[in-house]
Image (spheres, rainbow, N blue to C red):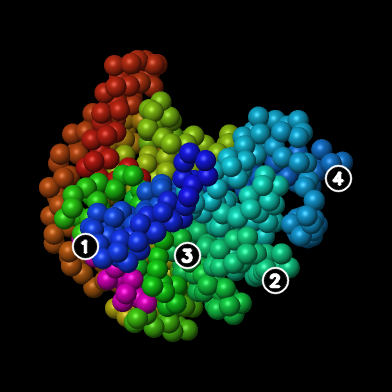
Amino acid sequence: AGSGAFFSTSRELLEPLVLMHDSLQECGDGFIARGGLRDLIRRVQSFGLFLVKLDVRQESGRHEEVMDAITSHLGLGSYSSWAEATKLQWLTNELLSKRPLVGGSAAFTCSPEVREVLDTFATIARVGPEPFGAYVISMTTSPSDVLAVHLLQKEMGCRRHLRVAPLFETKQDLTNAPGTMQTLYRNEWYRQHFGTVGPDYQEVMLGYSDSAKDAGRLTSAWELYKAQEELVRLSDEQGVPLRLFHGRGGSVGRGGGPQWLAIASQPAGSVRGNLRVTIQGEVIESYFGTEHMSDLTFERYSTAILRSSLAPPAAPSAAFRETMERMSATSCASYRAIVFETPAFVDYFRACTPEQELKLLNIGSRPSMRKAGGIESLRAIPWMFAWTQVRMHVPVWFGVGTALRAEIDAGRLELLQDMYRNWPFFQSTIELVEAVLAKVDVGVGKLYEECLVPEALRGPVGGRIWAEHALTVECVTRVTGRTSLLGNNPVLKRMFDLRRPIVDTLNVLQARLLKDMRTSGTNPDLQEAFASTVQGIASGMGWTG
């Protein structure tokens, strides 16, 4: 029975229900037990008391602030200044110790930001683990980021810890992910926590959005592929079951795309009968808006997972891997050269796109910037959102043409075509880039340039963007062997062609509104009209970004 006047866990609710069910069966009233009572038991078993579990997510830097406050309070110095080895040793010792650090969230004076994090853990301890899923650590960079969350759960009184899922987001963090997990698997406390205070498997979340913003779509895709391979190998080696959690966005620039294609292109062994993936709010309606669409979505996921589990794709040949490695390096260098190393790029981006004006709209779940700064501090969602509004989609394809051209000029066109035909990962990468290139409208993009971008920026930045676009279209069609973009997908091409003239009008209006807003200052009527164009263009493009 439940504690006091209410049931706090589904197990407490199930006990009297199962007792009633078994009693009815034993008394010969099975027909009653098999009716509504059995249906209720099944619902409780399926959905518990909370219908769906809620993930908790916080950035690693916020946890470091808490640990810094605690160590300073204890007279141990500044945690954030310690070397990683020192952090790991101290965290491990405290996790193995039975004594508390500060005796709860109210036991020491701290900043409101630190208090907020501690209160979150206190709430988890008070409510219990059943309503919660994973504790996701965004911007995970080191093993200490994971141990710190476990120590905070212990300190706040969580008898059963939420599973902690490190989220590896940037190119460098994806490269370091296997090393980070290997250190954790070898840690004395972490190794023994599986199945005791935590679940018996490891969940790792992979970030598609920030890695693409950091290094470009091609490099992001390849680093994610390699990270999955190594994480699977490492988990098999250590005997720890692994669940990969794919943090995909709605747009291709943030890891989105057709579900079947995305799952079929995963490396062998990364899909073993289960898959966890984010479904962005902007695409929920198209995936689950009707019963028929829900059935189709679940069918696609189920079929793709079964196929990838039972008949995984063959590992790429050494030649394929070497070529992909070269292209990734070339593409990343080209992308970062313009986005992060061209001084005028930030000014061009903020002049050509509505990035600054989007902040005026109450449409985001989080601040657009993690902290003050340039592109590096801008969140991936407004980054892609801004480029989508002007129909340029630069982060998805910039650098791809340069990488393909280098291989073609080296006489490896036939190898690229072989990769496209026989390697699902490369085929999906090229076809997603191709689909986005088909959405790019050069005329609309240049309209925004002419209306909003100072002439001094158009050549140094805009000229490079449009040259790369033309090169990418040429090289992609040569690799696919088709004469035009989407030549193999007439249905999708027809949909784009139908939507294009409708959205054109909205883009012309938005460009004019942006010009007026920037010259006349804050005007509620202009902002309202601008918000309508944003919504219309996003609907026409099929995603916000």
Residue 80 percent coordinates (x, y): 75, 46
Label 2 crowd (10 A; few <14 / some 14-19 / many >=20): few
Q: Given contact means CB atoms under 8 Å apart, are the residues at marks 1 and 4 in contact? A: no
Give the residue type that dot 3 points to. Leu
Labels 3 & 2 near each other (Cβ < 8 A): no
Magenta residues: mostly which secondary structure? helix
Q: What is the distance, in whole Å, between disc 1 and disc 3 at their CAs?
A: 43 Å
Query: Cα distance, mark 4 to mark 2?
Result: 26 Å
* Magenta range: 296-309
Position of residue 95 in the picture relative to residue 544 (left or right): right
Residue pointed to by mark 3: 244
- Indicate the position of residue 44 as horizontal and vertical percent values: 36, 54
Identify the residue at horizontal 38%, vertical 39% (top origin): 386
The residue at which mark 1 appears reads as 31
Mark 4: give few (<14), some (14-19) or many (20+) Cα within 10 Å: few
Look at the image and say whether residue 437 sits in the magenta stretch.
no
Q: Are marks 4 and 3 in contact (CB under 8 Å)?
A: no
| Circle nearer the N terminus (1, 4) | 1
Of residues 320 and 190, which is closer to you in this image? 190
Give SS at disc 1. Answer: helix
Give the residue drawn at x 24%, y 51%.
288
**Mark sitting on residue 186:** 2
Separation of disc 4 and disc 3 at Cα? 37 Å
Residue 237: image location, x then y, percent? 59, 80
Q: CA distance from mark 1 to mark 4?
A: 67 Å
The residue that disc 4 covers is 76
